Amino acid sequence: MNAPTPMIRLTTQRQIILEELAKVTTHPTASELYDMVRKRLPRIGLGTVYRNLDLMAESGMILKIEVGGTQKRFDATTDNHYHIRCAICGKVDDIDVPVIEELVTQAAAATSYHILGHHVEFTGICSTCQKERHGKAAS
């Protein structure tokens, strides 16, 4: 259901960015990935990481997650899945619920648009922030 994406060459820099992204489930920002990649490629620039992440997202190699007014985050898992964002700290996690494909069918029937996909963002308060809130309330 997604639009065709251009293929890009997997350079050494892109390979290392992809490997570092695949090591984590934290959906890091470009800056966080830059810090991770610099351990292996000390001379890489922040702009290079940003450009490569954008190219890799456009090509479908990775996902760019643009959630409610926060920094863009990146995900090595490219299959359809949902995310949940902490309303306090901004942490983003995968949420293991089935993707509702019928939603696309219903949207297509309700509009003249050609539906490419959909994005559902769940928001909540992560366990760390819940503990901090309860700790402050107890004080």
Image: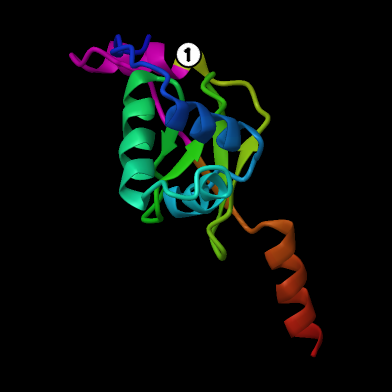
At horizontal 44% and vertical 21% (from top left) the residue drawn is 61
For the N terminus, the quadrant is: top left
For the C terminus, the quadrant is: bottom right
Q: Vertically, is 8 above or below 28?
A: above
Task: Give residue 19's quadrant in the image.
Answer: top right
**Residue 111: image location, x then y, percent:** 22, 17
At horizontal 77% and vertical 69% (from top left) the residue drawn is 131
Q: Vertically, is 109 above or below 23?
A: above
At horizontal 44% and vertical 19% (from top left) the residue drawn is 103
| Residue farthest to the left, as pictured | 112
**Residue 3: image location, x then y, percent:** 29, 12
The range drawn in magenta is: 103-120
64 and 50: which one is in front?
Answer: 50
Q: Taking 73 as reference, is 128 left or right?
A: right
Task: Give residue 104's quadrant in the image.
Answer: top left
Residue under pointer 1 = 102
Task: Give residue 105's quadrant in the image.
Answer: top left
Residue type marked 1: Glu
At horizontal 46% and vertical 27% (from top left) the residue drawn is 12
